[in-house]
Structures are given as structure tokens and as C-alpha cells.
Image (tube, helix red, strand yellow):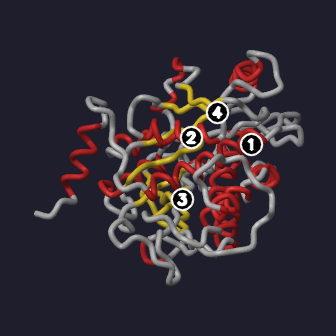
Amino acid sequence: MRRLSRLLAGVLLLASTLAADRPSVGRGNTPEVLRATARITEEVIRAHTKFLASDLLEGRGPATRGDSLAETYIQSQMEAMGVKPGAPGGGWIQKVPLVGVKASFSAPAVFRSGRGSAEGVPGDPMLSSEAVVYTAHHDHFGIKAGPRPEDDAIYNGAIDNASGVASILSVARAFADLRRPPRRSVYFAFVAGEEQGLLGSQYFAMHPPVPVGRIAANINIDEANWFGKTRDISLIGLGKSSLDRDVIAVAKTQGRAVKPDEFPDRGRFYRSDQFNFAKAGVPAAYLKFGTDVIGKPAGYGKEQVEAYEKNTYHQPSDEYRDGLDFSGAVQDARLAFLLGRRVANADAMPVWTKGDEFEAARKKAVDAIKPR
């Protein structure tokens, strides 16, 4: 039996000096929140993506040298923010049993972030035992077996999902810059083994840092926007939970519309890490780029997505290029930050839509933590 390593980080919310760039996030946000949101920039997302998708990381195949480098990089970024480790026992790595996976794909990694109250900064004593969990998978396929000398053998995974990890690292930076922590705890889980069957998030959902009935919501990013700002954003699973109104409210402050999955034949809700949270009963928001691209003709966004899925998805050609336009990824990451903050400060946790397939699992999870 091999071990699935998961890198875990606890977020430390503290004050710091911020750039003056003022994001457009609408009314209802304090100057502190505006400044924190402004820390989510295209330059930051680009830099993280460029490193994580470089040949040096050899495709981030689980249990490989490149995988270890990715873990070390993410840990160092969290530490630089003043983040504390959140793994059981106080470390950064949580070991996860893994059986029946080939050696080149055997050790996915995960991060998780920490408490809403840290370093003497008080959170809400009534709600700090509850949590919001962000996820982005950091693994990919490693190096192609038996390549020809002329082949590009490295599955760099720039869009899938170095860009998603970059986005969530940016969200963590924004939370770290808040003087006042949210009422609930906030965790960031950079899961691995997604490409091998959502393995990292499955284990996380089965062994969460707080009882699953106290996880208010999961917010997942899998592939960030690489083709420019949009007038819309897709919520995969729109209609399934009360998170709809939260996403719509935040998107409205950006002047954007929320749309359901524009490619419903892909079954996306059941193919990324939020699915494991949903199975455990946790309401989940899987945020996906919109396709109504500002300054481009109608249909341009869909054409970019379809071309990527046909020619680049899960191929060595998914590489970082300077021409990638991450301005839309900034929009989406800022929305993710404001969404998580909104949920973390709400009086009540989100709920599934009555009759939804995951409603019973939520009731079971909540009942399990009720006093006997």
C-alpha cells in the first residue's frame, strides 16, 4: 500500500500593507475588503501558473519528484502569507492510504487552510467551529510513458489545473490580508489524485478537519479562465442549493450574470472535487468561467473552450504561454473570495434545495453532530 500525501495549511488572518489597485467589487464591501480583493491580480495568477506548469515539475504526477516540488512550492507560498499548517498534529502533510494505483500516480497532495481565529485575533466563538473549504486539485498526469525522442512527453497541466491552484492561492492571500477574520473558519485544500478519480478530495471529505456537518460550503475551481474578462460566470450545479443566491449576489456586484453549465453533456458536477463534498452532504459551488467575453464577438468564448477540449485537454500541449489572458481568472477568483467571505460571515449555513439528491446526506451529517 502506498501513501497519498496531502499538504495542509492553516490560514492566519492578519493585517498587511496592500496595493492601491481598487477592484470593481460593488457596494457593501469595506475599504479593508476592497484592498484585500485587490491583491488578487493577473500578475499573481500568471506567476503561480507559470511555475506550477513548468517542465521542472515534470507534469506533477502523483508520487513523483515534480509532485513534491509542487507541494513544496504551495507550502512555501502559504508560509510566506503567514499561514499556519493545519494538518492533524500540526504539520503540513496528511498521509492518506492509497491502494491499487501505479507508482507514477500514487501520491496526490492536498493543502488545507486554517482557523477563522488565529494569533489572538478573535473570530466568532459561536461559529468558528464551522468552516468554509476551498479546493483546487494540483495534480496532473506526469510524464508520458515510452515517448518517441521527438515527442513532448510532459503533461504540464497549465490550465488543468495549475491555473486553479494559482486562483485559490490568490484567494488565500486575500483572506490573509484581512484584519478581521470571518466568523467561520476558512480552509484551503489543494487536493491531488483528482485525475486518478477524485482521490484526494474523497479522503478529505471522509476525514475533514471539522465534522462534515459543520462544513458550511465547498468552493471549487478546476481550470481558470484563460481567454479574457466575461460578462458572466457559470455555476456548475446551479439550482441545487441556496448557494445560488450567494453567487448571484456577489456576481451582481461585479456586473455579471450567473449561468448554468453551458456544456451540460459533460456531466461536470460529478467529475470534479466538489462532488465528494456534495456526497458527504456539503453544499458546493463549482465555479467555472463564463463565455460571454468582453470585447470579442458572440461565440468567441465557447469556441475557445471547445478548441481547448478538442486539442489541449489532458494533452502535453496544455502548457503555459505568455499569451494566456488571465484577466477573467482574476474576476472569478475575486468572486470566489467574496463568496467565501459572505458564506463564512452568514448567520446560517447554506442548504440544499428541497428534494435535491444530496439533501438526505446533509441531514445525516448535521444530525450526527447534534447533542445526544
Q: Are marks 3 and 1 in contact (CB under 8 Å)?
A: no
Task: Give whichever of discs 4 and 2 has the lower sequence position.
Answer: 2
Q: How far from the left and from the top, in percent, is residue 186?
A: 49, 62
Residue 345 lies, with reference to residue 124, above or below; the image says above
Q: Residue at x 43, y 77 (%)?
A: 89
Where does label 4 land, which residue?
A: 256
Q: Secondary structure at mark 2?
A: loop
Q: Nearer the viewer, mark 2 or mark 1?
A: 1
Residue type at the position of mark 3: Phe
Picture coordinates of residue 87, whole percent (x, y): 47, 70
Is residue 310 visible in the rendered image? The answer is yes
Q: Residues within 10 Å of mark 4 (few under 14, many from 20)?
A: some
Q: Quick one: label 3 or label 1, which is nearer the N terminus?
A: 1
Q: Which mark is residue 188?
A: 3
The image quadrant where one finds the C terminus is bottom left
- Circles 3, 4 touching at the beta carbon (< 8 Å): no
